[in-house]
Image (cartoon, rainbow, N blue to C red):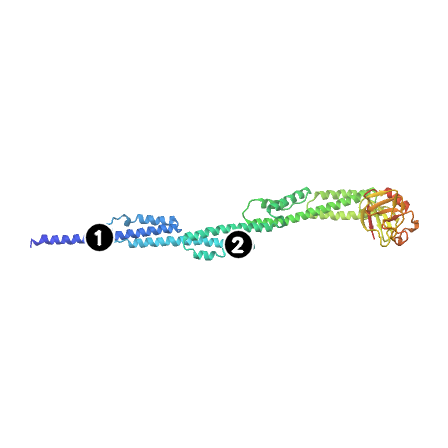
Amino acid sequence: MRRLLPIATAAVTLVLVGAGSAATARAMGRASSFHREVTTLEGSWTKDVREGVPEASVTPLHKALDTSKYMQASAWSPLWWIDDGSAFLASMHTKTDHAWTTAVAVARARAESAMTAWSEMELQYGSYVPTAASTAAAKWHTQLAEATTPAAINSLATAWAGEVASASKSAALDEVMVATGGYGGVPALLAAADHTVLVARGDNLDTGAVPSLIATLSASSTDAASTVTAIKSLEADLTSLNTLISLDGRVGTELRALDARVELASTHNAPNASGFASQYASLSTKFREGGTSARLDSVSSAITALEGSVNAALKAVGCGNTVPNGKVIDVDLSTQSAIFFDDGCTAGSALVTTGRAGLRTPTGTFHIYAKYSPITLISPWPQSSPYYYTPEHAQYALEFLRGGFFIHDAPWEPSTGFGPGSQNGASASHGCVHMPAPTMAWLYSWSPIGTTVIIHS
């Protein structure tokens, strides 16, 4: 029995050695399999980063793997006898998948944000959005559905954000251009507004909110909506200011016309002429104070009232007639008469004879541009014409229309031949205006070149 003890011990030893060898082989197999899977896992990380997963999302996975007990254990470590690392690898794969889905979700959120921004931009600008850009944006949903990697989705998001910005800028510029109407852009509108303010201030007028609106619109801003609002406000206030300037100009014209009437009243010693002058001076002061449309309307009403009083006073002394200033020869074809005015005051009158049937005296407003004394009037018609007349001699002639139209004396016409109906008598003219010789002598001396001639029915 003693001899069997060493043999039994040796047998047990052989069994233990065999079992150890098998365990070691199994451990080494597990370690090898683990590291092959690690190689595959690391390859997937490289591919994921290339396809858009952020490096920052993969770095923690690398660290978790590198510091794991499995990567520290040797191939013959007893660790592999009890743990093949499969649970750890499954966890790493789950985290890898999570990094991918997170990257896709973040990229999709960027893309969807760009799509939302596009929709909001279309709602804001409507028809101002470029047609080509709208057509391209209509395909975005399809493009997003076809994109399968974070990189592809991010590429779409970046491109779309740029297209939103570009289309917004273009639409804003178009909206601004349309908002500026006939001004042709913000710079032109601002230039017009600056000029209008300058004119208004020169006339001492209230410029209202226009200067502050100019400042607002001149300030650099990327807010198109605020810009358009400022444009519309400025255009509205600018219209009001231009209306005020026009009113100021009209009242100024009224005041100048009143000045001429007041001076005429003083010249002709019309009743209350000095009072008119005092009232005019007061109105002139109020006008220069400018200000608002209410003030100018008040001045205009006062001008109208004073002008009525001045005209009534002028009529009392034979003045105030509604004819141009200066000297005027007014010929009435219906009554065959003429009245001579000097600054609206009657300076004289006379009966006349004008053009016969077929050769009526032209009507309109003319001016004396030539004077002759004496003159021989020669027929432009041949002797065979019913309008022919033998050469006639006149002492005084005032030419008012080219083609031989004169105001002249007619020695061949009897003194009783002038007046109503004479245009149809034997002494009717061939288009000229005949006047009695004594009147014509005075008129020739009284009428300078440029004297207004008004002929009417």
The kind of residue on which mark 2 rests is Ala
Q: Residues within 10 Å of mark 2 (few under 14, many from 20)?
A: few
**323 with respect to 289 (left or right):** right
Q: Nearer the viewer, residue 194 or 264?
A: 194
Q: Secondary structure at mark 2?
A: helix
- Image x and y of residue 150, in percent: 41, 53
Q: Nearer the viewer, residue 126 or 402?
A: 402
- Count of numbered circles in the view: 2
Q: Nearer the viewer, residue 387 or 441?
A: 387
Q: Residues within 10 Å of mark 1 (few under 14, many from 20)?
A: some
The kind of residue on which mark 1 rests is Ala
The residue drawn where x is 41% and y is 51% is 151
- Splitting the image into 4 quarters, where does residue 98 fall? bottom left
- Image x and y of residue 389, in percent: 89, 50
The residue drawn where x is 35% and y is 49% is 60
Label annotation for residue 364: none
Label annotation for residue 132: 2
Q: From the image, tell me which residue sits under label 1.
A: 25
Q: Secondary structure at mark 1?
A: helix
